[in-house]
Image (cartoon, coloured by chain):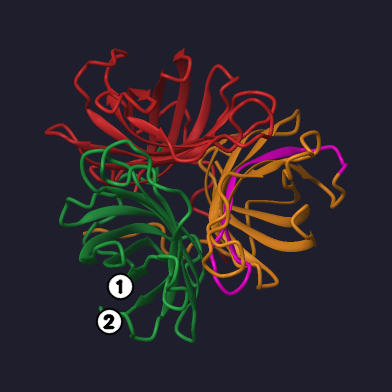
Chain colours: A red, B orange, C green
Amino acid sequence: FSTNVHSKTLDKNKPCKRFVLYYHDILFNGTNTANATSAAATNSTNLGNFNFGKIVVFDDPMTKDDHLLSPPVARAQGFYFYDMKDEFNAWFSYTLIFNSTEHKGTINIMGADMIAEETRDLSVVGGTGDFFMTRGIATFRGETIQGFSYFRLRMDIKLYECY
Amino acid sequence: FSTNVHSKTLDKNKPCKRFVLYYHDILFNGTNTANATSAAATNSTNLGNFNFGKIVVFDDPMTKDDHLLSPPVARAQGFYFYDMKDEFNAWFSYTLIFNSTEHKGTINIMGADMIAEETRDLSVVGGTGDFFMTRGIATFRGETIQGFSYFRLRMDIKLYECY
Amino acid sequence: FSTNVHSKTLDKNKPCKRFVLYYHDILFNGTNTANATSAAATNSTNLGNFNFGKIVVFDDPMTKDDHLLSPPVARAQGFYFYDMKDEFNAWFSYTLIFNSTEHKGTINIMGADMIAEETRDLSVVGGTGDFFMTRGIATFRGETIQGFSYFRLRMDIKLYECY
């Protein structure tokens, strides 16, 4: 006899930990080294007009409010790429790195960033340190896009496994 | 005293949800924009003759049967790359996106696609929406390879954590 | 009423399985095809002087001791990239593949490799075969770096969910 202890025991409305952070991405344009937080590792392909195949590596500041210049409380390190030929759509895999008196540890996240949706959910697939073995949901909301020079995402991190 | 509630409670033969979907990949060749579902973001390196280092970004249809032109029930968005110098072998990380009356939500998957094996298992590492917090196994089977223009994979998705 | 069965039930000091393996990476330089185990899929960007944006695909041997020429007990297939503009720092996502009499199966791992830290933790996000549905922590320690031709990482794999 075997049963699945994981069945139907989580309530989406009751994360064991939750916080909202803002992600700021300033793409390197060849001259803005001092300010840039990300750079395109590949060029777009010619499949459509929406950057299909452009892979961007980032080391972005995460802040508690939506101001780019607020003191970062974490870094987001990872990559995204564009993956649709008829609209802007992206896919992310990255790590939130906390190294402050408040939190030390990392949270690993991956999933589709369906830009056309007002909000979209990605998976928190693991964590370390203060976030040891955590899992959960990261809800993205696009806030500002300034061409390809700057964009900001609101990330609502809801953790449902806390140890 | 501490115990691990996760020990030995799952039966591989009793997923809480299971479905089979077919993944269709049509690589962009520079002229097939209308049909292409993926594109190479990088060229192959010169390490061996099996496309080592070629990274392909995709937005592929998923169908319930093995016909390319059947109505898609989901999209698979993500990437794969080739990673062996002496045979074709790949690695995948991607999201299944469901947006129908039947299912809304995503499933995130990653792992090695050992093409030489008849079947190979990847990890379902998370889910959102109808697949909130799921985990499981995605078993790949290669079905058809038409040079570099088209290939199809059977993906047998077995979920062992359902909420 | 809903409760979270996953709360506070794991002890970091009591993994259900643990092993240490050594990862050996020999980067392709254009001529060392016989020995190379990895290759750069992209060039570095010009953002800083620390290889920002360079993506390396690998199929590396894993050994039980720290000798490159010891018999591999697993392969590590996946990729890493450099992602900081003012120091060397990396990010990994990969699969450990076991195919021996001792173990058959895979372990999937992702996370930040903060090279400047003496040790750093990544997430084990899933597993297959003998490692069915596992989760845990992979602790990296850099051991040797010989320019860009060879480096070795000690990976201490601690699994906390074993089925």
**Are the residues flagged by discs 1 and 2 from a single subunit?**
yes
To which chain does the residue with label 2 belong? C
Which segment did they paint magenta? B69-91
Instruction: Report the label total.
Output: 2
Percent across and percent down for residue C49 are 26, 43
Give amino acid for label 1.
Tyr
Q: Nearer the viewer, residue B103 or C52?
A: C52
Q: Nearer the viewer, mark 1 or mark 2?
A: 2
Please name the residue shown 78% across and 53% down the image.
B150
For mark 1, what is the residue?
C22
- B147 relative position to A9: left or right: right
How far is mark 1 from mark 2, CA to CA? Answer: 8 Å
Q: Where, by quadrant of the figure, is residue B107 drawn? A: top right
Please name the residue shown 33% across and 71% down the image.
C24
Judged from the image, the secondary structure of the residue bearing numbered disc 2 is loop
For mark 2, what is the residue?
C67
Please name the residue shown 28% across and 40% down the image.
C84
Judged from the image, the secondary structure of the residue bearing numbered disc 1 is strand
Percent across and percent down for residue C79 are 44, 56
- Quarter in which the N terminus of chain C is drawn: top left
* Magenta span includes C37: no
Say few, some or many: other residues with alpha carbon within 10 Å of mark 2 (under 14 / 14 to 19 / 20 or more): some
Say few, some or many: other residues with alpha carbon within 10 Å of mark 1 (under 14 / 14 to 19 / 20 or more): many
Q: Where, by quadrant of the figure, is residue B98 drawn? A: top right
Percent across and percent down for residue B66 are 84, 52
Q: Looking at the image, do the residues carrying marks 1 and 2 touch, with CB atoms under 8 Å apart? A: yes
Give whichever of discs 1 and 2 has the lower sequence position.
1
Percent across and percent down for residue C143 are 20, 67
